[in-house]
Amino acid sequence: HNLKLQKQVVALGDRIGTGKESDVYIAVAPGGRQVILKFHRLGRTSFRAVKKKRDYFSFGSKGGNTPNSWLFLSSISAQKE
């Protein structure tokens, strides 16, 4: 939704891949260029077991300075990917 509002994507196509941590879709950017979007699914049940093994989930709510929100963790997960 935000990508469309920011005019970075004009259309979302079919899902072209599914993994244990994310779903991959084909999309169309302005000008008709095809792009790939990867949506990390931190809140899904299948990812909850994985998050116990990741180092960036251990700080935040356990005394660190960084928030342990889904948005923050999704951002970190995408950067590491």
Image: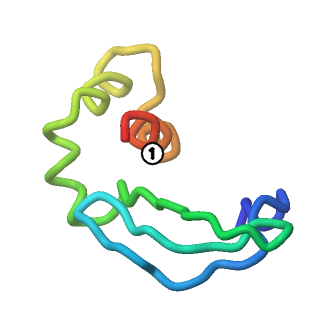
| Up-down relation of residue 55 to residue 12 (above or below) | above
Q: Is residue 76 shown left or right of residue 21? A: right
Where disc 1 sits, the SS reads: helix
Give the number of marks: 1
The residue under the point 48% across, 60% down is 38
Does 32 sit above or below residue 77? below
Q: Position of residue 74 (x, y in %)?
A: 45, 45
**Number of other residues with Cα within 10 Å of mark 1, as a class: few under 14, some 14 to 19, many 20 or more:** some
Residue lying farthest bottom? 14
Please state which of residues 31 and 63 is positioned toward the viewer in this rendering: 31
Considering only vertical position in the picture, is 50 above or below 64? below
Q: Position of residue 15 (x, y in %)?
A: 45, 80
Is residue 21 rendered to the left or right of residue 5? left
What residue does disc 1 label?
74
Picture quadrant of residue 53: top left
- Seen in the image, is 55 located left or right of residue 77? left
Q: Quadrant of the N terminus?
A: bottom right
Residue at 79%, 73% (x, y): give it.
Answer: 32
Specify the quadrant of the image occupied by residue 81: top left
Residue at 45% across / 14% down in the picture?
A: 65
Q: Nearer the viewer, residue 21 or 56?
A: 21
Q: Left of 47 or right of it: where is 15? A: right
Amino acid type assigned to the residue bearing label 1 in the image: Ser
